Image: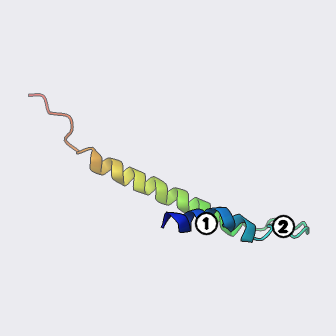
Amino acid sequence: MRSIFLTLLLIGPALADTGHDGIVRPRTMPELSDLALFVLAVVAIWLTRRALRRRLPTKAIPAKD
């Protein structure tokens, strides 16, 4: 499994497109990669907050009488 991941990590950029066709166009909306990064960040924040809530119980501080 690790060798497959390592192979894809090393060979993947060589198989990718160049990324630019040389024609300049005005941006009318965010690129798909921008939206994917935003969604990834939202999911990461949600998972982190959920994990922290599960780790810390709501009654962590004892009540004083």
Q: Residue 41 location, x and y as percent?
A: 54, 56
Residue 63 location, quadrant: top left
Helix, strand or loop for disc 2: loop
Helix, strand or loop for disc 1: helix
Looking at the image, the residue that sits furthest to the front is 3
- Of the numbered discs 1 and 2, the one sitting upstream in the chain is 1
Circle 2 residues within 10 Å: few <14, some 14–19, many ≥20: few
> What residue type is disc 2 on?
His
Identify the residue at horizontal 61%, vertical 67% (top origin): 8
Q: Residue 7 location, x and y as percent?
A: 61, 66
Which disc number belongs to residue 20?
Answer: 2
In-front residue for pair 11/25: 11
- The residue carrying mark 1 is 7
Circle 1 residues within 10 Å: few <14, some 14–19, many ≥20: few
Identify the residue at horizontal 54%, vertical 61% (top origin): 40
Identify the residue at horizontal 8%, vertical 28% (top origin): 65
> What residue type is disc 1 on?
Thr
Q: Residue 19 location, x and y as percent?
A: 79, 67
